[in-house]
């Protein structure tokens, strides 16, 4: 699909478009469709941050999606840097070069309207809700490990020219979005200094003892927080949970990289792993668990870890040229550190989704209070173990073994 800009004066200054304006925009500014009369426009966003529209030519079936950013956060009206839209467009364009099978195609980014026009991926479905429905995806670990390996390691200066990497770090500074993570992921779950944590009644003492008063844990989280804030290692997605993955039985697409910046590789890997634990644990604690889904969930966690590591090693060996970095001991030490980070960040993500104010849907699915409390405690224990033991765990099999041991305690 080719964009032919008309440069209409109406669209030279940002304003928030409604459905009628979107229809006019795609016809008279982008010239993607011949006539407004043939179009259907539907808002399909989740209503939290941006405005997302699906535009379809009802005669031909051709369609695109437009995602527009505003200067105010949609859910709360709080000011938020609109430059996040440029960052999202640029990372998607770069990832289309690195891993074209796994991200939507970008047709156009409008720097005046902060509107991103891209491929309609409505044949794919939100992975979080697919897993809640206990759908299994036999190829998921293969596909997501491809995405992780192909988009992360090649954006480091192990592979990129040093000057290019430094310029990319500048281009993707994303202060406000990173600040959200620094608070919600790495600070508030351990001291609640903004009083925004939401603790399920009955778990207050458990959370206080295991998180607020756990000095050894807080020491490790401090190291993870410091690494997140200071290790400009690779261009990371920054919010890679199952709600940002759209999937079907033929493939997947990763969307919404608004939190993207140059940070530690392990953060993206850890987020993927973390969000596989929620549906797995929810299913485990049901009176009648789905054994097929349980088996797939455990295999997915194990395989995502193992396959991602193996593919990192392969890309490292193929694309890293510097003789110092080709040193085998250095390579293994580097990969050990990345995957230790991944487990630590999986732990912080699990914990913050349990006690923070940005919860996951899976936590509300168990109808009995005792089952919900048990689920949250098990998840917190898993998160703590991943953080504390992150340097000791070196295989996917160990991850599953530890979950089963914690479940029996």
Image (cartoon, grey):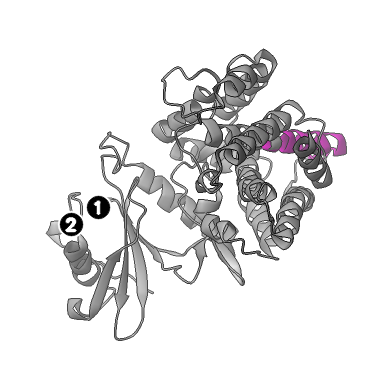
Bounds of the magenta span? 323-342
Residue furthest to the bottom in view is 59
The residue indicated by pointer 1 is 113
**Mark 1 to mark 2 CA distance (whole Å):** 7 Å
10 Å crowding of disc 1: few (<14), some (14-19), many (20+): some
**Disc on res. 11:** 2
Name above or below for residue 44 compared with residue 28: above
Q: Nearer the viewer, residue 7 or 223?
A: 223
Q: Secondary structure at mark 1?
A: loop
The residue nearer to you, when weighing 305 against 351, is: 351
Viewer-proximal residue among 95 and 298: 298
Q: Look at 20% across and 51% down and name the residue there.
A: 16
Q: Quadrant of residue 236?
A: top right
Q: What is the number of the mark on residue 191?
A: none
**Residue lying furthest right in this view?**
328
Give the x, y percent position of residue 387. 70, 29
Q: Is residue 6 visible?
A: no
From this view, report whether residue 150 is shown above or below residue 238: below
Crowding near the residue tagged with mark 2, few <14, some 14–19, many ≥20 C-alpha atoms within 10 Å: some
Earlier in the chain: of badge 1 and badge 2, it is 2
Of 202 and 406, nearer the camera is 202
Q: What residue sits 58% from the left and 25% below the top? A: 225
Is 376 one of the magenta-colored residues?
Answer: no
Locate residue 162, reporting x and y percent.
Answer: 60, 38
- Prevailing secondary structure of the magenta residues: helix
222 up-or-down from 404: above or below: above
Tell me what residue is drawn at x 29 percent, y 51 percent: 114
Quadrant of the rendered structure where residue 11 is? bottom left
The residue located at (36%, 79%) in the rendering is: 62
């Amino acid at each position: 699909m080719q964009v032919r800009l008309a440069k209409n004066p109406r669209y030279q200054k940002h304003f928030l478009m409604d459905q009628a304006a979107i229809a006019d925009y795609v016809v008279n500014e982008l010239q993607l469709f011949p006539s407004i009369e043939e179009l259907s426009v539907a808002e399909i966003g989740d209503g939290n941050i941006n405005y997302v529209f699906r535009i379809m030519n009802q005669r031909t079936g051709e369609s695109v999606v437009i995602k527009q950013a505003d200067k105010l956060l949609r859910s709360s009206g709080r000011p938020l840097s609109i430059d996040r839209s440029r960052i999202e467009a640029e990372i998607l364009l770069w990832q289309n070069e690195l891993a074209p099978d796994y991200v939507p195609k970008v047709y156009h980014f409008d720097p005046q309207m902060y509107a991103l026009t891209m491929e309609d991926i409505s044949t794919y479905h939100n992975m979080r809700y697919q897993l809640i429905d206990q759908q299994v995806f036999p190829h998921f670990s293969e596909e997501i490990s491809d995405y992780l390996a192909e988009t992360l390691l090649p954006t480091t200066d192990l592979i990129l020219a040093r000057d290019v990497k430094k310029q990319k770090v500048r281009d993707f500074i994303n202060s406000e979005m990173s600040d959200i993570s620094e608070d919600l992921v790495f600070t508030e779950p351990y001291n609640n200094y903004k009083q925004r944590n939401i603790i399920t009644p009955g778990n207050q003492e458990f959370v206080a003892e295991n998180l607020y008063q756990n000095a050894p844990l807080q020491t490790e989280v401090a190291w993870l927080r410091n690494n997140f804030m200071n290790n400009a290692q690779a261009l990371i997605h920054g919010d890679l949970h199952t709600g940002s993955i759209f999937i079907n039985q033929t493939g997947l697409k990763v969307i919404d990289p608004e939190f993207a910046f140059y940070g530690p590789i392990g953060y993206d890997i850890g987020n993927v792993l973390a969000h596989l634990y929620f549906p797995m644990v929810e299913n485990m604690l049901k009176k009648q668990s789905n054994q097929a889904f349980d088996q797939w969930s455990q295999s997915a966690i194990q395989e995502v870890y193992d396959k991602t590591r193996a593919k990192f090693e392969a890309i490292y060996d193929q694309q890293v040229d510097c003789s110092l970095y080709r040193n085998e001991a250095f390579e293994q030490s580097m990969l050990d550190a990345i995957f230790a980070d991944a487990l630590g960040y999986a732990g912080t993500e699990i914990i913050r989704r349990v006690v923070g104010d940005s919860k996951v849907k899976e936590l509300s699915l168990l109808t009995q209070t005792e089952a919900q409390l048990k689920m949250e405690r098990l998840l917190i224990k898993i998160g703590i173990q991943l953080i504390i033991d992150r340097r000791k765990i070196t295989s996917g099999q160990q991850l599953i073994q530890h979950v089963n041991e914690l479940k029996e305690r």
